Amino acid sequence: MNVSRATSNADCQLTVDKRLIEQVLINLISNAVKFSSVGGEVKIDLADDSEEFVDICISDQGGGIDPKILDRIGEPFLVGSAQISADGQGAGLGLSISKKIMEAMGGELIIESRLKQGVDARMRFPKTETL
């Protein structure tokens, strides 16, 4: 498993609750590692290209999420793969908790999936002015 990090702008600043943002990152990175294929790669990207948003994106090369449930991601106890429940690897709470935390911080959790290719979990924060 390879983990890589990239940034598009090193001067990017966010004002967030450290404890809460760590919890979201732990949940998303844990999912990415857990569901990546053997020899796959997990990428963590920081994008500050927009005038309105800062994005942190965690991408994996796993099996993706069933398109039938993609719109329901974030519901408590929803598991996105039969593999999860069969392996006992998750209760379906990580993304639900992460979504609520992001909303409480004024941000958004965006999940994009490519079946059999992987998932992009994007933490989107509105930019704040630095005084």
Image: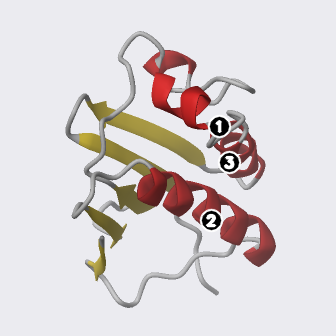
Residue 125 visible in the snapshot = no
- Give amino acid for label 3: Ser
The N terminus, quarter of image: bottom left
Q: Determine the residue positioned at 48% across, 15% down.
A: 69
Q: Secondary structure at mark 1?
A: loop
- Give amino acid for label 2: Ile
Q: Secondary structure at mark 3?
A: helix
Q: Earlier in the sequence, mark 1 or mark 3?
A: 1
Mark 2 to mark 1 CA distance (whole Å):
19 Å
Dot 3 and dot 2 residues touching (CB under 8 Å): no
Picture layout, residue 78 above or below residue 8: above
Circle 1: is it few (<14), some (14-19), or many (20+) Cα within 10 Å? few
Q: Determine the residue positioned at 44% across, 38% down.
A: 111
Q: Is residue 107 left or right of residue 4?
A: right
Q: How many marks?
A: 3
Q: Residue 88, labelled with which disc?
A: 1
Q: Is 106 in front, or is 98?
A: 98
Q: Determine the residue positioned at 35% across, 36% down.
A: 112
Picture layout, residue 76 above or below residue 100: above
Which residue in the protein does label 2 denote?
Answer: 26
Q: Earlier in the sequence, mark 2 or mark 1?
A: 2
Q: Is 1 in front, or is 87?
A: 87
Q: Residue 117: where, in percent of width, then height?
A: 20, 39
Q: Determine the residue positioned at 68% across, 67% down.
A: 21
Mark 3 to mark 2 CA distance (whole Å):
9 Å
Q: Residue 20: where, in percent of width, then height?
A: 76, 65
Picture layout, residue 96 above or below residue 62: above
